[in-house]
Image (spheres, grey):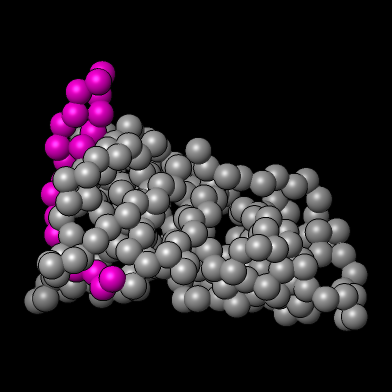
Amino acid sequence: MFVFISCATSASSVFGKVDRDKPPEVTVNFRLLVWAHAKSQSSSVTTSFKTGEPTEVRFHSAFHYRDGNVTKELRLLPGKPSKNISYAGDATLSFFSNPNLESPYAFSISFDPRWKEVLLLLYPKTSSEKTFNCLPVFRPIGQPSRGIAVNLTGNQLSLAVDGRQQRLPPWKPTQFPFSIRNKDHIRFGVNVIDYGKTKPLLSVKKFFDSDDSPILLLRREAFRDSKGRIKHGKLMMTTL
């Protein structure tokens, strides 16, 4: 399930008075990755008649946060991870949809001092896309030939890595081992588990080095049919 941390205080009381002599509670590098709410995907981006490519850059969300005495902004493209952000400060960091850092915040995360690098997956709680659930995902640093898979479908899945099966519960990042000995790729298979039976959804080859620690994100793309109903398409695997 998503990890979400609540707080009822205002922006001014969250940040409090800056103590210049106080050492940072945490020092961490993080990235953000956000997807649109299914019910918000009703409008399409204008495309070029000649090329079929988008003629505008549509930022999905803009978040604002306090870093020391400076308010910083992040503008995110849908389904694209942000740049790597270095942060040193209070363990609890709140992100706002408005530049004045006025409550309510969009989401808040409590960084563990032991964290050095984390990917924050964001999903809007409602179609208004003002507040978000947040799921932290950690790359297996210092563990070569080991990756992590995240099932974002809400269904019970199983992951096959070169034929070796393991379960992927929804919203629970799960590590998996792999080996590229005597070969140059890994074969991944994903099955859905329904009433004890499995149904294949995806089979794909991925090319990794032995010292890679990949993150695999599994989700279904939402869309509206001709009658305006929300549907979910084929399974998609994003590799980071």
* Residue 54 in the image, given as x and y percentages of width and height: 24, 71
* Residue 110 in the image, given as x and y percentages of width and height: 68, 55
Front residue (pair 162, 237)? 162
Tally of marks? 0
* Residue 75 in the image, given as x and y percentages of width and height: 49, 71
* Residue at 77%, 68% in the rendered image: 25
Residue that protrudes farthest toward the top in the picture: 195
Magenta stretch contains residue 55: no
The answer to whether residue 120 is left or right of residue 165 is right
Snapshot quadrant of residue 211:
bottom left
* Residue at 42%, 65% in the rendered image: 143
Q: What stretch is highlighted in magenta?
A: 191-210
Q: Can residue 134 be seen in this view?
A: yes
Magenta stretch: helix, strand or loop mostly: strand
Magenta stretch contains residue 208: yes
Q: In this view, does 140 lie above or below 172?
A: below
Q: Is residue 32 visible?
A: no
Q: Is residue 128 above or below residue 20?
A: above
* Residue 175 in the image, given as x and y percentages of width and height: 39, 51
Quadrant including the C terminus: bottom left
* Residue at 12%, 67% in the rendered image: 183
Snapshot quadrant of residue 215:
bottom left
The answer to whether residue 83 is left or right of residue 202 is right
* Residue at 28%, 71% in the rendered image: 210
Q: Is residue 32 above or below residue 40?
A: below
Residue that protrudes farthest toward the front in the picture: 182
The answer to whether residue 115 is left or right of residue 193 is right
Snapshot quadrant of residue 196:
top left
